[in-house]
Image: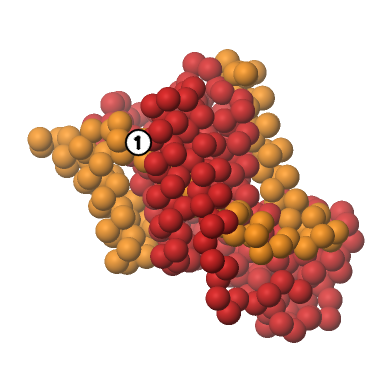
Chain colours: A red, B orange
């Protein structure tokens, strides 16, 4: 993010190109959506509720984590805190492309972030660094991901309801495996083991001694604080 | 503070999640157009993002059966070696299924 591109524009051609470029990757999203649909039914959501969550929330890890909190009663504060904490990375992603989006009218700027997700953001951010002015990758890529996420959820809801005793086939572990894959799939940084260790210990302590469901918030905050104790990353670009 | 997981309660919970998630998507753009996010805040957010997943997974591993634990181990190993999320998750599910069907 050294050079500043001249501007930004959003048009149909760029959006369609974004959809096409994301198409191969978004096929995998169908499978994740399917896993979410199956897991959601197993946790007692109706098919319609699972579809609604995929359509409106459109953030896989936080949706899987929300299923962990689902029961006869849904604890509100843990739900809000968990959703916010897992999706807090969006804050940084948005901040990173804000200088680019600033060239767009406010309605387009705050409209296209609805579709901002990890992979289309990453491709759009790479576009921007190459001097691309068209933000179609962000919007088109987001549309492709949103459609396939929804399609996958639908398939999971339709076929998942036919599966009896899903835990016999290991389907109850989808959530845990998905979240773990997301956790270690990101940027490799061994120093993160310090906050993650703190988070694990704090979560277990909260499970033992604090009210139910507080362990996610306690673990996340403990991890965040442990992160503050780490030395600053060396030779990283300083914020302008 | 809880919502019952009736149809209305569940839809309310989903709407709340949607609003919170949109706040994270728009928040970075909104804040950056006023104040830049400093390195300390960035470190906190970076550490917190992974930590929340750790805090969700750890109890699953502690409370689950050996099928669930081995599934997580399989996912971790495949993810670390191949970096392919789909393969890693499949390995986890298959491991749990094999453990429970034959043992």
Secondary structure under the numbered disc 1 in the rendered image: helix
In x, y percent, where is residue A38?
Answer: 41, 35
Q: Relative to A80, does residue A130 appear above or below in the rendering?
A: below
Name the residue rendered at 16%, 39% in the picture. Answer: B99
Task: Classify residue A136 by image quadrant.
Answer: bottom right
Circle 1 Cα neighbour tier, 10 Å, few/some/many (<14 / 14–19 / ≥20): some
Q: Report the quarter where the N terminus of chain A lies.
A: bottom right
Q: Relative to B68, does residue A185 appear above or below in the rendering?
A: below
Which chain hosts label 1? B
Report the front residue among A199 and A89: A199
Name the residue rendered at 79%, 80% in the picture. Answer: A5
Whether residue A74 sits left or right of residue A184 in the image: it is: right
Picture mark count: 1
Residue that badge 1 annotates: B60
Task: Classify residue A35 by image quadrant.
Answer: top left
Name the residue rendered at 50%, 48% in the picture. Answer: A223
Name the residue rendered at 66%, 43% in the picture. Answer: B21
Q: Is residue A33 visible?
A: no
Report the front residue among B38 and A47: B38
Q: Relative to A160, does residue A11 appear above or below in the rendering?
A: below
In x, y percent, where is residue A226?
Answer: 51, 52
Whether residue A126 sits left or right of residue B70 in the image: it is: right
Report the front residue among A78 and A49: A78
Whether residue A118 sits left or right of residue B60 in the image: it is: right
Q: Is residue B63 visible?
A: yes
In x, y percent, where is residue A72?
Answer: 49, 16
Q: Relative to A208, does residue A129 appear above or below in the rendering?
A: below
In x, y percent, where is residue A14?
Answer: 73, 70
In the image, farthest residue toward the right:
A105
Q: Report the quarter where the C terminus of chain A lies.
A: bottom right
């Amino acid at each position: 993010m050294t050079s500043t591109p001249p501007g930004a524009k959003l048009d149909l051609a760029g959006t369609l190109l974004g959809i096409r470029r994301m198409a191969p990757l978004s096929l995998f999203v169908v499978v994740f959506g399917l896993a979410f649909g199956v897991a959601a039914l197993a946790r007692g959501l109706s098919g319609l509720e699972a579809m609604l969550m995929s359509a409106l929330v459109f953030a896989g890890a936080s949706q899987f984590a929300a299923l962990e909190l689902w029961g006869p009663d849904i604890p509100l504060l843990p739900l809000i805190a968990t959703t916010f904490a897992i999706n807090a990375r969006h804050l940084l992603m948005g901040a990173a492309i804000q200088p680019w989006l600033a060239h767009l009218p406010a309605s387009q700027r705050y409209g296209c972030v609805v579709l901002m997700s990890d992979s289309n953001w990453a491709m759009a951010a790479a576009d921007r660094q190459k001097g691309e002015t068209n933000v179609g990758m962000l919007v088109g890529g987001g549309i492709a991901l949103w459609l396939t996420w929804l399609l996958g959820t639908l398939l999971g809801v339709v076929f998942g309801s036919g599966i009896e005793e899903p835990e016999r086939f290991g389907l109850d572990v989808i959530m845990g495996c998905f979240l773990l894959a997301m956790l270690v799939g990101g940027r490799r940084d061994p120093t993160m083991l310090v906050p993650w260790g703190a988070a694990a210990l704090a979560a277990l302590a909260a499970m033992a001694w604090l009210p139910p469901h507080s362990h996610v918030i306690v673990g996340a905050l403990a991890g965040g604080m442990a992160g503050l104790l780490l030395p600053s990353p060396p030779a990283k670009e300083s914020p302008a | 503070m809880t919502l019952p997981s009736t149809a209305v309660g569940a839809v309310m919970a989903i709407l709340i999640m949607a609003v919170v998630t949109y706040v994270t998507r728009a928040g970075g753009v909104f804040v950056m157009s006023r104040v830049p996010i400093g390195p300390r805040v960035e470190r906190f957010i970076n550490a917190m993002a992974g930590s929340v997943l750790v805090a969700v997974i750890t109890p699953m591993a502690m409370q689950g059966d050996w099928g669930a634990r081995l599934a997580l181990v399989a996912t971790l190993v495949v993810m670390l070696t191949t970096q392919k999320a789909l393969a890693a998750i499949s390995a986890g599910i298959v491991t749990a299924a094999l453990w429970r069907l034959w043992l």
